[in-house]
Amino acid sequence: MTKTVEKYLQALKSELSGRDSATIQDALADAEEYLRNALDAARASGSDMNEADALVQIVEQYGTPEETAAAYVEVERRTFPGLGPATAKQSVSPLGRFFGIYADPRAWGGLFYMLIAFVTGVVYFTWAVTGLSLSVSFALFIFGLPVALLFLLSVRGVAWLEGRLVEALLGVRMPRRPLFAPQNVKLLDRIKQLLLDKHIWFSLIYMVTQFVLGVVYFVALVVSFAFTLVGLAIPVAQEFFDIPAITIGGGLFVYLPDWSYPLTVLAAILLWTLTMHAAKFIGQLHGRYAKALLVTE
């Protein structure tokens, strides 16, 4: 029988051993919030029971670690992250599988994520650098502690929001609720806890590297889209608008022969299809990277 919240959480973590790390984080956060809030309510009511006896009654209402773990396993079995399981029939032919990428929601999700990663990367990087600079600069002043606390808490919030974005677009299971933060904790103790929390520092690393990855993703997509658009537009531009395929400095214009039009269009379609495959692969790879840094043990 568990006599402390810590022992309950440890038992719950053991029961969920081998399950998805994001599921474990959600289960521990839910349990800790419920148990600690219930204990605070029991103290406020003036109950003469000690913490161990009060926790026994609370666990009877909430459920044992075994019951809680079984409930979470059942919920995970019935729900799917983000895009859900693939329901489209897989073609047996290589050509069908190649062009079937257009019916794969994970490819479109990865493509959209690569586009917005540039914006989120800029926002994350700016917030991380600004927050760290202000926290260090104000460390000597009394108002520096609240600034540091707010910044570190905001990093947790950004990590949770990014996790929701990753799950929605990339289909990788991420935490669905923020980590529990106890209320009745002194300011210095709260900052000390956050400074020693490696989840905060891993999230900061993610926020900084997201800027670099976002730039790479955005440039790669823009270049691929530009070449695809050019390949599709060359026949129309030459035939109807007399625009050359290639213009070289000095007034040299190069027109492609009519027989090459199908080849340019086919090359453009193949290039964009390969881009879709790459977007799906990069999306799944980025999802694993985000899970490694943004999910606590």
Image (cartoon, rainbow, N blue to C red):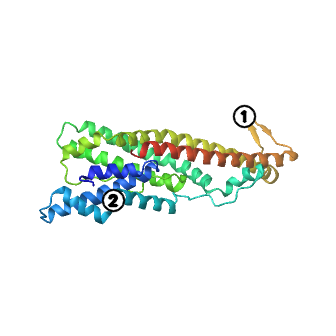
Q: Is residue 143 above or below residue 29?
A: above
Q: Residue at x 32, y 51 (%)?
A: 9
Is any atom of residue 158 visible in this view?
no
Which is more toward the observer, 234 or 219? 219
Amino acid beneath label 2: Thr
Question: Which residue is identified by label 2?
Answer: 64
Left or right? Give the position of 148 relative to 200.
left
**Which of these two is toward me, 83 or 222?**
83
Which quadrant would the N terminus be assigned to in this image?
bottom left
Label 2 neighbourhood size at 10 Å, few (<14), some (14-19), many (20+)?
some
State the image coordinates of residue 211 (x, y, percent, origin top left).
47, 41
The crowding category of the residue bearing disc 1, from other C-alpha atoms within 10 Å (few below 14, some 14 to 19, many at least 20), is few
Q: Of all residues shown, which one is farthest toward the right?
A: 259
Q: Is residue 193 above or below residue 106?
A: above
Which residue is pictured at 41% across the width and 38% down the height? Answer: 205
Q: Is residue 65 left or right of residue 48?
A: right
Say which label, 1 or 2, has the lower sequence index. 2
Circle 1 residue: 249
**Secondary structure beneath disc 1?**
loop
